């Protein structure tokens, strides 16, 4: 058996049909895994009737890293480094989902300031993720300019993240029970300066592409996913809200104090590619609102659970307290032991419902980690969105569903 | 939807595996966890006819745990390569250290690879570590030689 037959790479002919004088044939073609419009290593096997798609099968796993297995062999605090490596575009969202679930196991008390800071960073990261989505999504349709503008603002956000965590990606800043440390000096002023300038930038994007007739023609009525189909295929996040279902975990099951903030959940009834793009635009405005409110309510205070069995004691205590040294030693060498049980906290990532199901056997490492990644589940809606449509519109559908392949394969 | 291998869970009684389903009722915003317990090599009925969303999830469980789902329209592995053997999320599957034979003939033996990294041997990959070969490798070789000589004299 040749490599082509076994793997299905290349072009295959599936069958011929005669229609009077002319004859049609179905073609099976392979897209990816190395293809610029697949946003990573996504492979699609597409059956085509002319230019129309009759069947589409996503093949995933090219970026499988075995994070679930790896996290079973790390203590709860060590495992914080893994979540943000999955969805590298919305790393704080993954970190938040993981620490919330671990805190539910432990019944940890997270100080208010830590919760506010988490919300600020997660929402800023949501903006950064949507900016990346807009830039690359429009880039897939052939419009290069917007990419540079969205990347400019994303850089400003990444600078803020660099201030707090020291790195621009893979932050590892949240801890089970709070934060690694308090915000650095000058963060608030810099964040406010960004928020003040950002709405102007959103207007700029609107003039650049939202009224652009070529973009509108490419996206209007393309890849329509009706609400019932979306729900049946497990679609969540902005793509589901574009189909008219106002499901947002920040409203449905508030966590980290989201119930304190006033914001709206934008929805649209169109369910097409254009609606999915505009949902992200509107969500960025809402995120700006949330960050503003969280900054306003930010009050000085501790950023870690004071429980010595969960958080490391402050450095100053280690110099004169034997007890603090013992707790420090236990936490560093062994970690904490949550009681037996299971926990799951559904959060709203930039892509949809994200949750970590942790099973504890009473040891210092999770017995089982199941990650409900939104990108993988959302990818199942790609076939209903594409079938019957043009092959060229598939690119719009992939872009508008916004899969991050690290999140898909985990 | 996900599976758990209870093999090494302390004081666990009952079947080895469980498959759990997170159900979310949108109208009432209520959540429910449904769990089926089953032994090894027992197949479960698919739920893809009720919820197409379970399609990828059942494939993932099939791939990583080896639990089959009867009636699934397209039950293939999801994330591991075609020629990969075993179900990595089972508790008796070791972390790392699994020699892998790829279908293009390449063979990766992790133990030999690590030996090559510290310069102790070329390993079966045929690559001798350059960057790390130095003090560390000399110490290892010297210790081995000393041990062998000591044994001889005794």
Image (tube, coloured by chain):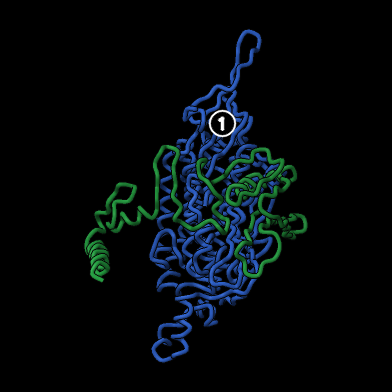
Chain colours: A blue, B green
**Residue positioned 53% across, 36% down in the render:** A44
Q: In terms of depth relative to the viewer, which is nearer, A267 or A252?
A: A252
In this view, which residue lies farthest toward the top? A21
Q: Is residue A232 left or right of residue A91?
A: right
In this view, which residue lies farthest toward the front? B154
Is A284 placed above or below B75 here? below
Query: Pointer 1: what residue?
Result: A46
Q: In terms of depth relative to the viewer, which is nearer, B13 or A221?
A: B13
Image spot of residue A297 (x, y percent): 55, 73
Marked residue chain, label 1: A
Residue A295 in sight in this render: no
Residue B139 appears in which quarter of the rendering? bottom left
**Residue positioned 35% across, 53% down in the render:** B113
Q: In terms of depth relative to the viewer, which is nearer, A356 or B107?
A: B107
Image spot of residue A308 (x, y percent): 52, 82
Is A235 placed above or below B24 here? above
Q: Is residue A71 left or right of residue B61?
A: left
**Residue positioned 77% across, 55% down in the render:** B27
Residue A380 appears in which quarter of the rendering? top right
Q: Secondary structure at mark 1?
A: strand
**Residue positioned 60% across, 66% down in the render:** A101
Is A156 placed above or below A76 here? above
Residue A409 in sight in this render: yes
Image spot of residue A139 (x, y percent): 45, 40
Image spot of residue A256 (x, y percent): 60, 68
């Amino acid at each position: 058996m040749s490599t082509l037959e076994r793997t299905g790479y290349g072009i295959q002919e599936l069958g011929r049909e005669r229609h009077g004088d002319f004859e049609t044939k179905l073609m099976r073609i392979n897209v990816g895994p190395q293809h610029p419009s697949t946003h990573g290593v996504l492979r699609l096997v597409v059956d085509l009737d002319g230019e129309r798609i009759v069947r589409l099968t996503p093949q995933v796993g090219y970026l499988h890293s075995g994070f679930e297995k790896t996290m079973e062999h790390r203590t709860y605090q060590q495992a914080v480094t893994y979540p943000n490596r999955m969805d590298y575009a919305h790393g704080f969202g993954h970190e938040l989902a993981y620490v919330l679930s671990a805190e539910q196991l432990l019944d940890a008390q997270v100080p208010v300031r830590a919760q506010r800071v988490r919300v600020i960073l997660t929402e800023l990261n949501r903006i950064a993720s949507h900016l990346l989505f807009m830039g690359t999504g429009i880039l897939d349709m052939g419009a290069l300019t917007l990419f540079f503008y969205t990347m400019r603002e994303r850089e400003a956000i990444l600078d803020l993240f660099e201030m707090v965590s020291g790195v621009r990606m893979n932050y590892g800043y949240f801890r089970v029970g709070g934060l690694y440390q308090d915000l650095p000096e000058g963060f608030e002023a810099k964040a406010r300066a960004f928020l003040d300038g950002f709405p102007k930038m959103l207007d700029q994007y609107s003039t650049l592409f939202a009224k652009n007739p070529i973009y509108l023609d490419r996206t209007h009525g393309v890849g329509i996913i009706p609400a019932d189909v979306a729900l049946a295929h497990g679609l969540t996040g902005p793509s589901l809200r574009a189909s008219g279902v106002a499901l947002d975990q920040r409203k449905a099951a508030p966590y980290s104090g989201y119930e304190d903030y006033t914001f709206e959940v934008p929805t649209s009834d169109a369910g097409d590619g254009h609606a999915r793009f505009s949902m992200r635009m509107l969500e960025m405005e809402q995120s700006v609102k949330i960050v503003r409110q969280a900054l306003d309510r930010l009050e000085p205070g501790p950023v870690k659970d004071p429980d010595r069995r969960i958080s490391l004691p402050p450095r100053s205590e280690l110099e004169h307290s034997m007890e603090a040294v013992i707790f420090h030693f236990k936490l560093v060498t062994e970690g904490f032991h949550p009681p037996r049980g299971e926990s799951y906290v559904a959060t709203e990532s930039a892509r949809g419902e994200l949750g970590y199901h942790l099973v504890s056997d009473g040891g210092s490492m999770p017995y089982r980690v199941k990650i409900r990644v939104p990108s993988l589940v959302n990818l199942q809606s790609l076939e209903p969105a594409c079938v019957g449509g043009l092959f060229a519109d598939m690119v719009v559908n992939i872009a508008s569903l916004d899969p991050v392949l690290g999140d898909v394969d985990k | 939807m996900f599976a758990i291998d209870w093999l090494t869970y302390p004081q666990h009684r009952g079947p080895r595996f469980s498959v759990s389903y997170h159900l979310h009722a949108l109208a009432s915003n209520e959540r429910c966890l449904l769990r089926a317990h089953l032994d090894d090599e027992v197949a479960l009925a698919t739920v893809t006819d009720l919820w197409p969303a379970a399609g990828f999830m059942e494939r993932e469980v099939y791939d990583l745990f080896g639990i089959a789902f009867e009636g699934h329209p397209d039950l293939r592995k999801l994330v591991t390569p075609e020629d990969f053997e075993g179900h990595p999320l089972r508790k008796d599957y070791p972390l790392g250290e699994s020699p892998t034979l790829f279908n293009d003939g390449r063979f990766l033996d992790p133990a030999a690879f690590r030996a090559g990294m510290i310069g102790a041997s070329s390993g079966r990959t045929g690559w001798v570590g350059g960057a790390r070969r130095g003090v560390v490798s000399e110490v290892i070789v010297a210790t081995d030689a000393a041990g062998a000589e000591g044994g001889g004299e005794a």
